[in-house]
Image (spheres, helix red, strand yellow):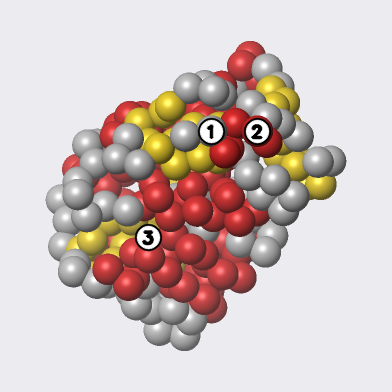
Amino acid sequence: MRLLIVDDDVELCSLLKEFLERESFTVECVNEGHAALEAAQQGGFDLIVLDVMLPGLDGFEILKRLRTTSRVPVLMLTARGEDVDRIIGLELGADDYLPKPFNPRELVARVKAILRRTENKVNRGRVEINGVALDPGTREVTSDGRAIEITTLEFDILEQLMRNAGRVVSRDGLMESLYNRKATPFDRSIDMHVSHLRRKLESSRPVIKTIRGVGYQFCQSPEDAVIA
């Protein structure tokens, strides 16, 4: 697995490189925004660790430009307490975020969790419900025959919801399954990703219903969306 670490803190990059290489990752570090975008666009990386504050181009602009051509998983590094950074990162297509300062072991755990989610699962088979089709082999999604661009984490959330269509999938269950950690009252990342999925999929009819205080349900038919 090849990882790209983008951070202007040379010492931190060196530390993370050491930790990750102990886990058998191949790691490349870049300390400037334009160089980072060029490296990321060349491809070949399985995951990118991307800091927000960078010289040249900031992390948000890099992610925005990268998402026009690539779905490579991205873990954003944000300033602790800056909720707006986390929200913007998720809206632009980040797969997870980690506030600074952090324990390098937690970063390694987050990286592994993201990569476990994004492994091709060709044996799971294609699923099509309520006009939405999802193919784990190609990681492609269509809605009423229209190709939908979604992030890796959005794909994994959608797959769980579709494979449990008609049943309620709890928000806490999604959080533990996808992030490998328990949800907190103030962690709204799952809610934001579901909101993005709705915006992308629901051009003609609702497909994801919120069960207040519990979680979400993928509707097997348009009629299911109006049933309390």
Give the residue pinned by disc 1.
227
Q: CA distance from mark 2 to mark 1?
A: 7 Å
Q: Is residue 208 left or right of residue 136?
A: left
Mark 2 packing: few (<14 Cα in 10 Å), some, or many (20+)?
Answer: few
Mark 3 packing: few (<14 Cα in 10 Å), some, or many (20+)?
Answer: many
Q: Is residue 8 left or right of residue 165?
A: left
Q: Amino acid at mark 1?
A: Ile
Q: Secondary structure at mark 1?
A: loop
Query: Which is more toward the observer, 111 or 212?
Result: 212
Q: Nearer the viewer, mark 1 or mark 3?
A: 1
Residue located 70% across and 46% down the image: 205
Q: Amino acid at mark 2?
A: Glu
Image spot of residue 121 (x, y percent): 59, 22
Residue 122 seen in this snapshot:
yes
Question: What mark, if any, has residue 18 been given in the picture?
Answer: none
- For marks 3 and 2, the one nearer the N-term is 3
Tags 2 and 1 touching, CB below 8 Å: yes
Image spot of residue 69 (x, y percent): 69, 60
Q: Amino acid at mark 3?
A: Met
Question: What mark, if any, has residue 76 been given in the picture?
Answer: 3
Against 55, is 166 above or below?
above
Give the residue pinned by disc 2.
223
Tags 3 and 2 touching, CB below 8 Å: no
Residue located 68% across and 36% down the image: 222
Tags 1 and 3 touching, CB below 8 Å: no
Residue located 84% across and 41% down the image: 145
Image spot of residue 202 (x, y percent): 66, 49
Q: CA distance from mark 3 to mark 2?
A: 38 Å
